[in-house]
Image: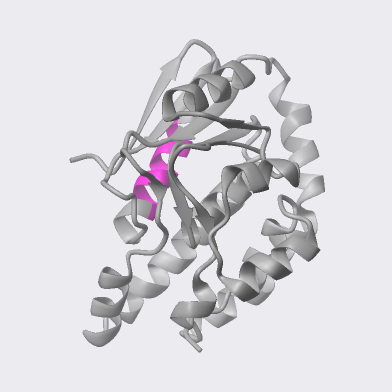
């Protein structure tokens, strides 16, 4: 089964994560980057929507089973490739010269929540699914770059709450804080709203990409200068 697919609908590239709960591992990072490559290569694409068909999850974050097995088996190169690969995905989302919209049709946990925050805009369903940073409960500290780019999506005082409590947050709460563009009553309506919003964008790639590069210059520098040494030194757990 294909982990991530890209299908162009009109001027919108729909990237579909289709691997159950869409837990992230090395194969996921590689497939997501390939999908972003395909979307950007199509010059008719003016926006990207990232979605999932799973009945209750958008992306539940790192595949901890895969990660712990790789750690226990000494496959450190695979772990580093995964972590660096996901950082490449996050950086690509921050710089790709079209708007990227997360259509969160279910749970967004850990690295799944990170993925949503790396997008430019977010929609989420209200009838099922939570947004959560559980790292405090699984002893995995956020990388400096993660903190930096998540703060573009979530006010610092709310991020402090979300990260240090690890609590589950509803779409209504996110919408009240303007973290979402919209909170919709079902998965279908969430995807529809995200697609309609994506369809309003007809911006030139040159200016859009330059704005994103300038907006996120400091974040990208943190990811390059602070994240990579921690990953290469395998300082990934507390």
Q: In the displayed image of the protein, which residue is found farthest to the top?
A: 10
Q: Position of residue 34 (x, y in %)?
A: 39, 41
Q: Residue at x 44, y 37 (%)?
A: 105
Q: In terms of depth relative to the viewer, which is nearer, 106 or 219? A: 106
Placement of 161 over or under 16, stated as above or below: below
Placement of 155 over or under 40, stated as above or below: below
Is residue 53 rendered to the left or right of residue 144?
A: left
Magenta span = 29-38
Q: Residue at x 46, y 84 (%)?
A: 234
Report the colour scheme.
Answer: one colour
Q: In terms of depth relative to the viewer, which is nearer, 190 or 14? A: 190
Q: In terms of depth relative to the viewer, which is nearer, 138 or 142? A: 138
Q: Is residue 19 inside the magenta stretch?
A: no
Q: Which residue is drawn at 66% across and 33% down?
A: 97
Q: Position of residue 187 (x, y in %)?
A: 43, 30
Question: Magenta: predominant secondary structure element?
Answer: helix
Q: Where is residue 71 in the image (x, y as percent from the top left)?
A: 30, 83
**How many numbered marks appear?**
0
């Amino acid at each position: 089964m294909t982990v991530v697919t890209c299908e162009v609908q009109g001027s919108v590239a729909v990237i579909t994560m289709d691997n159950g709960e869409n837990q992230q591992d090395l194969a996921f990072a590689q497939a997501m980057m390939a999908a972003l490559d395909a979307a950007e290569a199509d010059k008719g694409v003016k926006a990207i929507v990232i979605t999932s068909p799973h009945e209750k999850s958008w992306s539940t974050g790192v595949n901890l089973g895969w990660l712990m097995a790789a750690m226990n088996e000494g496959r450190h190169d695979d772990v580093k490739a995964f972590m660096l690969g996901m950082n490449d995905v996050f950086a690509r989302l921050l710089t790709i010269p079209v708007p990227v919209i997360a259509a969160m049709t279910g749970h967004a946990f850990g690295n799944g929540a990170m993925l949503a925050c790396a997008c430019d805009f977010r929609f989420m369903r209200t009838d099922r699914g939570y947004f959560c940073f559980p790292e405090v409960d699984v002893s995995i500290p956020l990388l400096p770059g993660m903190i930096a780019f998540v703060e573009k999506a979530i006010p610092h005082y709310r991020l402090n709450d979300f990260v240090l409590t690890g609590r589950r947050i509803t779409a209504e709460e996110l919408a009240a804080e303007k973290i979402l563009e919209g909170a919709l009553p079902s998965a279908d309506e969430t995807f529809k709203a995200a697609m309609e919003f994506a369809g309003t964008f007809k911006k030139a790639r040159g200016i859009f990409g330059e704005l994103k590069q300038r907006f996120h210059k400091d974040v990208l520098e943190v990811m390059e200068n602070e994240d990579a040494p921690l990953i290469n030194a395998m300082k990934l757990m507390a």
